[in-house]
Image: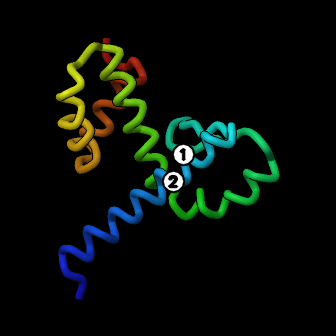
Amino acid sequence: MVNVTDKKQFQERGKNMVCEIVEELKSEAIVIALSGDKINVTGDENRIKEILPRIHKHKGEIIRDLKLEKIQEWLFSIEEPEEFHHLVLDKCRNDPEAMAYFMKHVNGEFK
């Protein structure tokens, strides 16, 4: 049985791994972008081949993080006070319907 502390540490380690992958790619001038529910990766083909298994392993988390990044960019674009961003982002992390709703805003489906 996993206690709550161990579970939180495990989840944090997973989140950090995803952040590390995305930041690592960005630092190497490899572009990782979201297209619907697919990840597009462009740049050094040899490096992409090397890191592709890690991307596949964490695909869901990477997609979630890229969506959260887009939502935060949108929040800045509508001049939502930064101190409230965490409320929206936390809601989206925990509620797929909230994520879908805010992604519609990001994609300009609501005017």
Local secondary structure at mark 1: helix
The percent coordinates of residue 70 (x first, y second) are 42, 30
Disc 2 + disc 1, Cβ < 8 Å: yes
Gap between marks 2 and 1 measured at Cα: 5 Å
Q: Is residue 12 above or below residue 64?
A: below
On residue 23, the disc is: 1
Is 4 on the left-hand or right-hand side of 24?
A: left
> What label sits on residue 20 in the rendered view?
2
Q: Furthest residue to the top?
A: 111
Q: Residue 12: name its quadrant.
A: bottom left
**Label 1: few (<14), some or many (≥20) within 10 Å?**
some
The part of the image, by quadrant, that contains residue 40 is top right
Give coordinates of residue 30: x percent, y percent: 68, 40
The residue most toward the bottom is 1
* Residue type at tag 2: Glu
Residue 67 is labelled as none
Looking at the picture, tell me which residue is in the foreground, 13 or 94.
Answer: 13
Q: Position of residue 89 (x, y in %)?
A: 26, 38
Image quadrant occupied by the C terminus: top left
Rendered-image quadrant of the N terminus: bottom left
Task: Report the side of 6 relative to 109 (left or right).
Answer: left
Q: Amino acid at mark 1?
A: Glu
Q: Residue at x 60, y 40 (%)?
A: 26
Q: Nearer the viewer, residue 108 or 76?
A: 76
Indicate left or right for 52 with 109 as reference: right
Name the residue rendered at 41%, 35% in the picture.
69
Task: Assign a secondary structure to mark 2.
Answer: helix
What residue is at 55 percent from the left and 53 percent from the top?
21
